[in-house]
Image (spheres, helix red, strand yellow):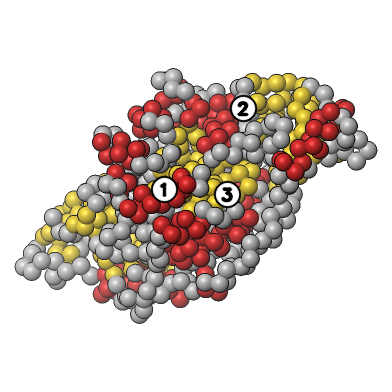
Amino acid sequence: MARKPTPKRSNPRSWTEVAPLLVDVAMGRKPADLVVRNGRWVNVYSGEIIAATDLAIVAGRFAFCGPDASHAIGKGTKVVDAAGRYLVPGLCDAHMHVESGMVTVTEFCRAVIPHGTTSMFIDPHEIANVLGLGGVRLMHDEAMAMPINVHVQMPSCVPSAPGLENAGAALTVADVAEAMTWSNIVGLGEVMNFPGVAANDPIMAGEIAATVKAGKTIGGHYASPDLGLPFHGYVAGGPEDDHEGTRAEDAVARVRQGMKAMLRLGSAWYDVAAQIKAVTEDGIDPRNFILCTDDSHSGTLINDGHMDRVVRHAIAQGLNPVTAIQMATINTAQHFRLDREIGSIAPGRLADFLIVSDLPALVVDEVYGRGVRLARHGKLDVGIEPYDYPRSARNTVKLGRKLKAADFDIEAPKGANEVRVRVIGVIENQAPTRALEADLPVEDGLVAMDRRNDVCQIALVERHRGTGQVVNGFVSGFGYMEDCAMASTVAHDSHHMILVGTNKQDMALAANRLGQIGGGVVLFSKGKEVALVEMPIAGLMSDERAEIVAAKAEKLAEAMRKMGCSLNNAYMQHSLLALVVIPELRISDVGIIDVTKFEKVDLFV
């Protein structure tokens, strides 16, 4: 893939370049570009809220934070009256995947800036699984052009579980070492192959060593409830944070071992409430707790918010508002060794801040990035030019042939009238699944679904190399009561096409439709298309505005509800059914995978 030249970021100059100017403004020898007066300073270093504070900003950085900045006001200085409102550092999302928003980096930023997000740490391992290192570079370069800080973590596990799945590309230790030299790479993305780390897998060890050598942060992903020796081996291998905890004891265990416990609230992952009790009830030091989203789709971003939503949720669980803000600002900045740049309102730091009228409810009135107002009352103030993805990033769905209903037939063992099968069980609002079993009837030699007991069919269609391969299985939890099928080319992490349906003809129609348009998610019922979100960029992202994508996603969600699905954010649950690094049972292009044992198992028990 041809690489575009890295675009020039609209960053302010470095601190070393402007330090004399900052001193001059702080001393009153030169005027500030912007002075914000009479605010209540949320100081994340001291944990205080300091009334009657002024901020003086020059060259995109804070020069003075104190009781009176009148000495920094000159003829050309813009003055803003905070009128007693709170001055809050811009919010940071410590771990997230832009692709889960169904939109590009540009559109993701357009959606979240009005909610107060001014820094994001993105792991583009979704596009890496489709386009490899070239795909990572595309998102890295797009991130460089944003008016906020979009830092990139180099994906670590492509494929996520070698031997259990085959992705569209593979990344090597040499790829990781190369990426560590790129200007906007801040660390290694979540190391999902936790058994490999504990077993001293040379690829995992090599990638971690390359990251340490570069002096950057190693992201973690320990998706197991086992806090015994495998956990200790994983921590000893180098990962510095983890967002896969779901219990208070998970958060405690990670912090005790010197990791950062990342607590996520995404569109479908609700892991903050249980784990925050480690702070609110057990009294664990909150400095090593970080808030993040992991995966948020466009509907959540447009309608509910981003990191502001997470902070409000944490406060609602009984967390002190200032502590919650620390977990979404300075704790994140310190973790990524960027606290001299972001995460606080303090001299020398980038002037990323919010003017907030209600702190516990986190009502964001105005958003500033690098000293420029970016949004006011929920509306973006600045234009962001779209990034031009090349044609090679748009033609990635290769089915190899037209699929038929018979491709989804599951033949029963010869002579059987009933079979016992393994079933993937969806857990609402969580990433793990359950390994279930069900007795299903056999009709004309084929295993039938059991709609009454919520057992329908799941299939994975290989879409990177055009092999025409189909793997079939069963899933429970969607509650579909009508003839229907949903297909998606977003199927973490290898991103083959994944289908869930109660009708094989609809499954074939849905699969072929996505092959025709180059990817996305579509729902068919009784032979008719009822909802579609086109995602032509790598089969993962739309090139439309976030508001348009959100509206299409809502139409999809409503169509799923009409089919009988009452799951919260069912699309997100659908997209993770092939994630072979989170227990218990998954589907991949290799077959049905038992993730507690990390091995392929037979569909029939």
Query: Distance from label 2 to label 3 (Cα)?
Result: 21 Å
Residue at the spot of label 1: 209
Report if residue 423 is visible in the image: no
Residue beneath the point at 19% across and 57% down: 601
Mark 1 or 3: in front is 1
Q: Is residue 41 visible?
A: yes
Looking at marks 2 and 3 on the same chain, the residue that comes earlier in the sequence is marked by: 2
Q: Foreground residue, 72 or 424? A: 72
**Foreground label between 2 and 1:** 1
Q: Which residue is mark 2?
A: 44
- Position in image of residue 38 (x %, y %): 79, 26
Along the polypeptide, which appears first: circle 2 or circle 1? 2
> Residue 164 location in percent, x, y?
28, 59
Where disc 2 sits, the SS reads: loop
Total numbered labels: 3
The type of residue carrying mark 1 is Ala
- Would you name the residue on which mark 3 appears? 151
**What's the amino acid at mark 2?**
Val
Identity, as a three-letter code, of the amino acid under mark 3: His
Q: CA distance from mark 1 to mark 3?
A: 20 Å
Q: On the rendered structure, is 342 left or right of 35?
A: left
- Mark 1 burial class by Cα count in 10 Å: few <14, some 14-19, many 20+: some
Assess disc 2: are there few (<14), some (14-19) or many (≥20) residues with their C-alpha within 10 Å of its C-alpha.
many
User: Which image quarter: residue 87?
Assistant: top right
Q: Position of residue 81 (x, y in %)?
A: 81, 31
Q: Quadrant of residue 495?
A: bottom left
Residue that protrudes farthest toward the front in the picture: 213
Residue contact between numbered discs 1 and 3, judged by CB atoms under 8 Å: no
The answer to whether 112 is drawn above or below residue 308 in the figure is below
Residue nearer the viewer, 3 or 47? 3
